[in-house]
Amino acid sequence: MKKIALPKMDIVSFFKNLDLKVHLRKLNLTTLLGILAYLHVLVILPLIFSKNKPFVQFHVKQGLLLLAFSALGMFALYVPVLSWIAIVFFVIFLIAGIINVLLGRERHLPIIGALAEKI
């Protein structure tokens, strides 16, 4: 069996290069609504108050699908291993979405992003 060499990831240098202080200074209503889009039921607020902001609408679509998948994931709570997998994916997508908002990016989340474009 052949071993695959994965590149070493230095977590400290990753966070040093990710200068969030610069982006957190730009915290305005658009950024706040984008963050709320990923916070489960609070997706309703950006849905109502950001009709003419394409950046927020992009994240609202992904937030709505994340909410729908988490509602479906509630049924997975009856299967022990599946519930842990569902929770981990939800948290990863939640964090990735919020980081994308803070950095001002419109990047698709895996799986959810492609479906959000069809909404």
Image (tube, grey):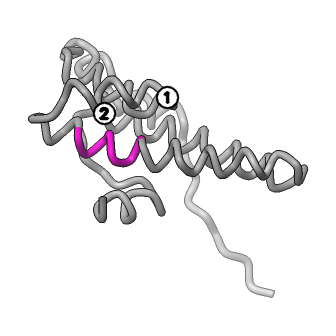
From which residue to which does the magenta span run?
Answer: 57-63
Residue sitting at 34 percent across and 38 percent down? 100
Rendered image: mark on residue 101:
2
Rendered image: mark on residue 41:
1
Crowdedness of circle 1 by 10 Å Cα count: few (<14), some, many (20+)?
few
- Examine the rendered structure and indicate whether residue 51 appears above or below residue 25: below
**Sequence order check, earlier mark of 1 and 2:** 1
Front: mark 1 or 2: 1
Q: What is the three-letter code of the residue carrying label 2?
A: Val
Residue 95, percent across and down?
Answer: 50, 35
Residue sitting at 9 percent across and 35 percent down? 52
Q: Secondary structure at mark 2?
A: helix
On-image quarter of the C terminus: bottom left
Residue sitting at 32 percent across and 40 percent down? 60
Asked if residue 113 lies in the magenta stretch, the reply is: no
Instruction: Determine the image quadrant of residue 27.
Output: top left
Q: Nearer the viewer, residue 97 or 53?
A: 53
Q: What is the three-letter code of the residue carrying label 1?
A: Val
- Examine the rendered structure and indicate whether residue 86 appears above or below residue 26: below
Instruction: Determine the image quadrant of residue 71.
Output: top right
Query: What is the residue that sits farthest to the left in this orientation?
Result: 52
On-image quarter of the N terminus: bottom right
Q: Nearer the viewer, residue 117 or 7?
A: 117
Horizontal side, residue 28 vs residue 111: left or right: left
Horizontal side, residue 1 vs residue 10: left or right: right
Asked if residue 59 lies in the magenta stretch, the reply is: yes
Horizontal side, residue 102 vs residue 79: left or right: left
